[in-house]
Amino acid sequence: SNPLSLSVPDPTFESWLRDSGYLDVIDNQQTAAAAASITGTSTISDPTITIPISSFLFRYLVSFFSHLWTLLSLLTFNPFAKLTTNDFSGETPSWTKGFFADFLSYSFPASASQARLRVQENVKRYARNYASLFILFFACSLYQLPLALVGLISSLALWDSFRFFSDKWGLNRFPVTEMILVRFAQCVTAIILLWLNVQMALCCTLGVSYIVMLLHAAFRKLTPVKQPSQGRRK
């Protein structure tokens, strides 16, 4: 809770937490508020009151559609909005303790705003892990589609041969001829990729990777990050 509520409004305090990097505090606060609201609405003061089955069914339907709307809201925003190239330059977080962790490190997001907060932050934290999963899924797709693997290898061999002969013949001295050959190689590459269904393997990989990334980032709780140490002023 806001320890400065008498002098600092809650929105200002939450904005300071966001700017300072204490997003895990906001995440825990939203989870606790949602749990408190659910407990408050489910309390029955008189034990002799009987609730019809239809009311339970209605409550569960409302909860189901609320959870469904929370998941669907993840498709309405850009999860890579705060992602930068620096997020790929650091060390890869630990797969056991950092990325997967234990069962208690996961919970259903209490609201759409909490889901978006988790996704944007976790995508930045585990960008290298998600990139590794994309490569793994793409390798599995190529294993399931051998023709796509042949097409990819053929395309790489084509461009490697083009670079070899370009350096050997000195095509950089003839820019027009080099440009014509590049365009011809691009057309041949597109035909090979389309004919051998490389785009199918790539589309399947992108779809599966995107869904796995969204679900993991939305259900993964935000954990405290190491804050930058500030030197003492003398």
Image (spheres, rainbow, N blue to C red):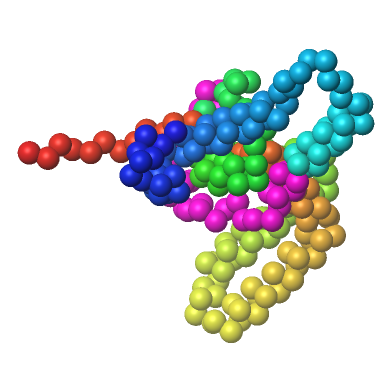
Q: Position of residue 213 (x, y in %)?
A: 65, 41
What is the count of numbered marks?
0
Image quadrant occupied by the C terminus = top left
Relative side of 72 to 28, left or right:
right
Q: Residue furthest left?
A: 234
Q: Position of residue 27 (x, y in %)?
A: 53, 36
Relative side of 57 to 97, left or right:
right
Q: Position of residue 143 (x, y in %)?
A: 78, 39
Query: Is residue 86 inside the magenta stretch?
Result: yes
Residue range in magenta is: 69-97
Residue 223 or residue 7, whichever sits in front: 7
The residue drawn where x is 64% and y is 61% is: 159
In this view of the protein, can residue 133 be seen by the observer?
no
The residue drawn where x is 71% and y is 74% is: 184
> Image quadrant of residue 34?
top right
The residue drawn where x is 73% and y is 64% is: 189
Q: Position of residue 22 (x, y in %)?
A: 42, 38
Query: Is residue 37 inside the magenta stretch?
Result: no
The residue drawn where x is 74% and y is 71% is: 187
191 in relation to 216, above or below: below
Residue 175 or residue 86, whichever sits in front: 86
Residue 99 or residue 1, whichever sits in front: 1
Image quadrant occupied by the N terminus = top left
Residue 85 or residue 215, whichever sits in front: 215
> Image quadrant of residue 52?
top right
In this view of the protein, can residue 53 be seen by the observer?
yes
Q: Residue furthest bottom?
A: 176
